[in-house]
Image (spheres, grey):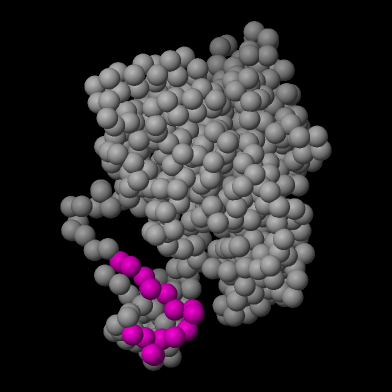
Amino acid sequence: MSLLICPEDKANGRIIERDIRNLPDCSSTASVNVHIVLFPSDAFPIAKQFWQHTGMGMSSRLAEHCLAMLPDEVTQTKTSSSPPMTPRYNGKAFNKHYSVKPHSKPTSPPPSQLHSTEETLEADHRIYLEERYGRNLPLAFAASAKRALRRRVAGVLIHDTTHEHQGEPVAGEQNLVVGPSSRGVADVSEHDVYLYPTGMATIWNAHHVALATRPVAKSVCFGFPYTDTLKVLQKWGPGCHFFGGGVDSEIDELEALLEQEAAQNPDTPPVIALFAEFPSNPLLRSANLPRLRALADKYDFLIVIDETIGNFVNVEVLPYADIVVSSLSKVFSGVANVMGGSLVLNPRRKHYAALKKYMDANFEDLYYDEDAIYMERNSRDFQQRIRIIDENTTAACDFLRSRSIAGGVTSAVLKEVFYPKYITLENYEICRIKTPGAEGGYGGLFSLTFTSKAASEAFFDALECYKGPSLGTNFTLACPFTILAHFAELDWAAQYGVEEGLVRITVGMEDTQLLLRWFDVALKAAEAAANLATN
């Protein structure tokens, strides 16, 4: 069902039933047409899978905007019969694995002070503050913000700038002169870039574009990916061939599979598309893209590359892909206060015309305007931030690897540092940007494995950074990745080297020496725990 919510609803005190084809009483651009799916309760598991894996749905900002337009009696609950709210955890860190040690970060104010001015501001007041004292654009410039984002992702800006011109970002000006793309494919343009509400939404839609434009066949997932990617390929469509190692020997296995399938059905491609992350999350393995491209050309299937971890400041993967997707929620934004994703078509590839025709006919801009404005603001300095993060991460990984078994210390509690500088380096170097003055690094994400569960837990608990499941933030963030992403399938994940005790860390922009002290303290705690367990 469809529900059109208009600003007039709040003043009228009720939601008016409207014909969305004729809306003389609801002409405001602030109106939102919400689509609601009702389903029987026994279908909840299926509905949950769609919500969980596809990245489609309302953002929190859009939901807040809708709630603000609804009549008060719809959104406000009566509190007279409700007991007074009390702090559930008495201001203490209730989970040691996700808390920051009190001495390392400012503590939260007492519960009595939590009703801050920010919470009581009217929506218009908050927007005014962001536009006047922050760097946000006025909402009227949403189209300009999206244009700026598409140009940044396309790499066509001759000189990106953080400045604005008459309220509009310079990067989004309608008549701005742009140049050849820096993405490794000179003729890619902003018109080949499509924005989505989340990164997973780009993968979901890339999969559907492949299903809609190519003959029916299974997909290939090459390498161990973020869990939702594999689930999308397995649960929607004909199915998926999974090559979880992502190493060169599995390309030989893939080639044998393609040859066999092609022999059985010579008139149709053996697979529809191959999906790969570059590098992968969480093992940071880089696939041999030239070999995969050669197979795609020979057997006529698409290649979809997720460049979120490597990012296009560090690597050029577009020349090998038909479609490149990325989660802009990560390092492109950096602030972890907005979500978004991008899908880029490669105009040099054989199936570009069919893909472009389908996208232009079926693409619907569902990226909420205010989310786009936040993303545009956050991404203005993403290239400078990425270079700082690259340097910090390389320093941290060099330090940690020097005290690992992989680094030659046989008695170490740290087994391996999974980072593109050490893992499948030759494949990563093929795509790493080597332009003088704009040389790419190895990214801001790495993972650690330990000799024992006790050492892993002690390291994680002692690490004085924030703890949480995201990545690409301007601040360092750690998580027990396997426990969070594969708790119900630990043995399955372990088959591919994703150990239960794996700790994944995304490095931020803190002072390098501070980061090294954090890792030194955490590593000593892991060593102490391991010694205690053996004595």
Image-based side of 322 in relation to 128, left or right: left
Magenta segment, prevailing SS (helix, strand or loop)? loop
Numbered disc total = 0
| Rendering quarter of residue 448 | top right
Examine the structure image and report whether residue 23 is included in the region drawn in magenta: yes
Q: Residue at x 60, y 76 (%)?
A: 140
Q: Relative to 484, does residue 395 appear above or below in the rendering?
A: above
Image-based side of 162 in relation to 477, left or right: right
Quadrant that contains the N terminus: bottom left
| Rendering quarter of residue 430 | top right
For this rendering, which residue is in front, 7 or 292?
Answer: 292
Q: Residue at x 36, y 70 (%)?
A: 34
Q: Position of residue 493 (x, y in %)?
A: 41, 26
Q: Position of residue 191 (x, y in %)?
A: 55, 56
Image-based side of 158 in relation to 113, left or right: right
Residue 219 in sight in this render: yes
Q: Residue at x 65, y 53 (%)?
A: 152
Q: Which residues are magenta?
A: 22-36
Q: Residue at x 40, y 33 (%)?
A: 301
Q: Relative to 136, does residue 335 appear above or below in the rendering?
A: above
| Rendering quarter of residue 22 | bottom left
For this rendering, which residue is in front, 150 or 44?
Answer: 150
For this rendering, which residue is in front, 121 or 463?
Answer: 121
Q: Position of residue 362 (x, y in %)?
A: 38, 59
Quadrant that contains the C terminus: top right
Image-based side of 192 in relation to 215, left or right: right
For this rendering, which residue is in front, 452 or 318?
Answer: 318
Examine the structure image and report whether residue 107 is included in the region drawn in magenta: no
